[in-house]
Image (cartoon, rainbow, N blue to C red):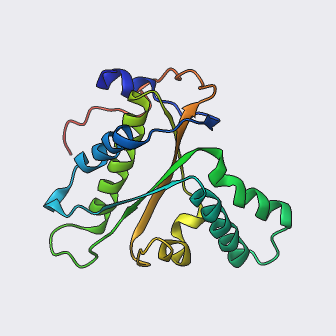
Amino acid sequence: MDAMTALNTRVTPARLVDPAPAGAELDEILATALRAPDHGKLKPWRLFVIAGDARARLGALMADNLRAREPDAPAPLLEREAEKPLRAPLIVVVAAKVQADHPKIPVVEQVLSAGCAAQNIQLAAHAKGYGCMWKTGPIARDAAFKSAFGLAETDELVGLLYIGTTDAAPAPRQVDTAPFVSAWTGA
């Protein structure tokens, strides 16, 4: 699939099933993350691949995290949280290991670089015939959850990318650039 087709046809699927990319195909997809723009060559991206039984362990961690944030959370909500990692056969957690005190590269550029890395993974997965859902939520900002990945509180968890075979992908939406694009001619 050429780049323009990938960019213009990528959608977020409602459901993902086996198989997920693995081996050399997964390596090829993940390598695209390392092509993200990287001002200062800081390489702030960190990728954590979660598959198989590790998804259930991630679900337990997510449920524990929810319980800590919301001590009165009902059991069905905790169960639903624990099942989230099971909605796809593969998860890639994308984070930005930031250098907050860098003299030239602000934190926002480092986080945006990791965001570009995540987008590259999404597009590469799509180009290879897989679907990808990008999820965050309160857990992405939680210090204890970030710590489980060896991240500091100041690091940013950019997203959890759920990857697998698309069960039934929605059709790409028609887009209209007019509300978002304007010509600037000076101050």
Residue at image location 40% in from the left, 29% down from the top: 128
Name above or below for residue 156 compared with residue 120: below
Q: Residue at x 31, y 70 (%)?
A: 98
Image-based side of 75 in relation to 44, left or right: right
Give x and y (percent) for residue 183.
27, 32
Q: Identify which residue is drawn at 20% across, 75% down.
A: 102
Q: Is 5 rendered above or below residue 154? A: above
Counting from the top left corner in percent of width and height, residue 165 is at: 55, 32
Identify the image quadrant of residue 55: bottom right
Camera-nearest residue between 5 and 176: 5
**Looking at the rendering, which quadrant does residue 89 occupy?**
top right
Task: Determine whether, in the image, residue 137 is placed left or right of residue 63.
Answer: left
In this image, 97 relative to 11: left or right?
Answer: left
In the displayed structure, 163 sits above or below 147; it is: above
The image position of residue 180, as x and y in percent, is: 41, 34
Q: How many marks?
A: 0
Q: Nearer the viewer, residue 89 or 44?
A: 89
Q: Indicate the quadrant containing the N terminus: top left, top right, bottom left or bottom right.
A: top left
To which quarter of the image does residue 155 belong?
bottom left
Q: Which of these two is toward me, 137 or 144? A: 144
Instruction: Name the residue located 53 percent from the left edge and 23 percent from the top edge.
Output: 173
Residue 92: % across, % down: 46, 52
